[in-house]
Amino acid sequence: MAGLTDKRLEESQMTDWESFYELVSMINSIVICVIFGVAFSYFCMPFVEQKKHALAVGASFSAMLQFLWIIPIKIGNFTVYSLSVIAGFLVLYALEKNRIMQKIFLAVTFFSVRWITMAIGNCLYIWIAKICVELPHFSENLGLQFQLFLFNVVLNDIVDLALLLVISWLIGKVYKYSNEDMNRNEFLLLVMPSMSGLIGYAMMKYYDYNYRVDTNYKLSEISIQFNLMCLCYYVISLITIIVLIVLYQSIKEKQEEAKQNELLNGQIESIKHHISRVEHLYMDIRGLRHDMGNHITTMEALYNTGKGAAAKEYMEELKQKLWLSQK
């Protein structure tokens, strides 16, 4: 009887702990919706015409994320976050129909950065979990296991929010031409690091999953080297996204400088042409003054010598020449 009572007590404790896990998971799902909604709004803030449009994007993302989590149909996380990002993109496009390629870039980049930052948090948690597992009586201590689970939830939320805000701030700071759209080539150039990081993350998880299927263990949890390589890859992916945006902005600056120089050169040539015309006009005026002086001298000489008829004839000849020149 005592053994049966102990077993029932143990089952009752397990049920209590399961309810605690479910409660924390439910609260965390709401917190995650808020965190990612805030991060998406902050991410889009430098690229929108009005701040309320960025807030609408974050709100639509959070609402879609929460809706897809509470519906009875089971949907994979990749699909859930994809649909949520698409919802945010459609709201932004409905509010601002300009710069379409830039908006697609924002959606793809945020989607990729979100997964990579989450993966970085998981890498950190694995190291902490390895330390905790080695503690005495950890496998029997349900309370300590729950504390580790709770710590993992809080750590991931903090790391996700902090990294997303930092990356969003960096992108907004280095992306100087946020009011200009990008062409297809520029879009492909900027979106490649995000796609590469996302595909690399998927490959790491796929390899880790297959290893667990074969051995019943996660490679990332038993191999410090593999976990470290994953962490380095994720960090390098984030850095690559920022660096390529900086290079893109540098190219844009040089293009702007080239346009300004071309415009300035055109203005200089126009000024030179204008100066040349003024100089020719000035030379013509000087020649006219010289000719007028000669004509006046000639007419004075004719009048002084009593040749008024000749002077009048000379004046008529000048008038005819002036009339013909005006035609």
Image (cartoon, grey):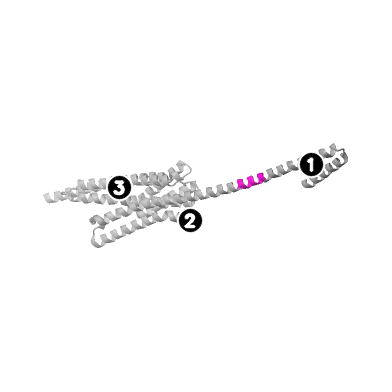
Residue labelled with disc 1:
295
The residue at 74%/42% (across/down) is 290
The CA span between labels 1 and 3 is 99 Å
Q: Main secondary structure of the magenta part?
A: helix
Query: Where is 177 relative to 218, above or below?
Result: above
Residue labelled with disc 2:
184
Where does residue 289 sit, x and y in percent of width and height?
73, 41
Where does residue 122 sit, x and y in percent of width and height?
29, 51
User: At label 2, which amino acid type do we have?
Assistant: Arg
Whether 274 is among the magenta residues is yes
- Of mark 1 and mark 2, the one earlier in the sequence is 2
Q: Which residue lies most toward the front here?
A: 305
Q: Residues within 10 Å of mark 3 (few under 14, many from 20)?
A: many
Where does residue 59 sit, x and y in percent of width and height?
41, 44
* Left or right: where 101 falls relative to 325: left
The CA span between labels 1 and 2 is 72 Å
Q: Residue 30: in sight, yes or no?
A: no
- Classify mark 1: helix, strand or loop: helix
Judged by depth in the image, the label closer to the viewer, 1 or 2, is 1
Q: Which mark is residue 156?
A: 3
Q: Quadrant of residue 201?
A: bottom left
Q: Residues within 10 Å of mark 2 (few under 14, many from 20)?
A: few
Residue sitting nearer the eye, 90 or 162: 162
* Left or right: where 264 falls relative to 224: right
Judged by depth in the image, the label closer to the viewer, 1 or 3, is 1
Magenta stretch, residue numbers: 270-279
- Classify mark 2: helix, strand or loop: helix
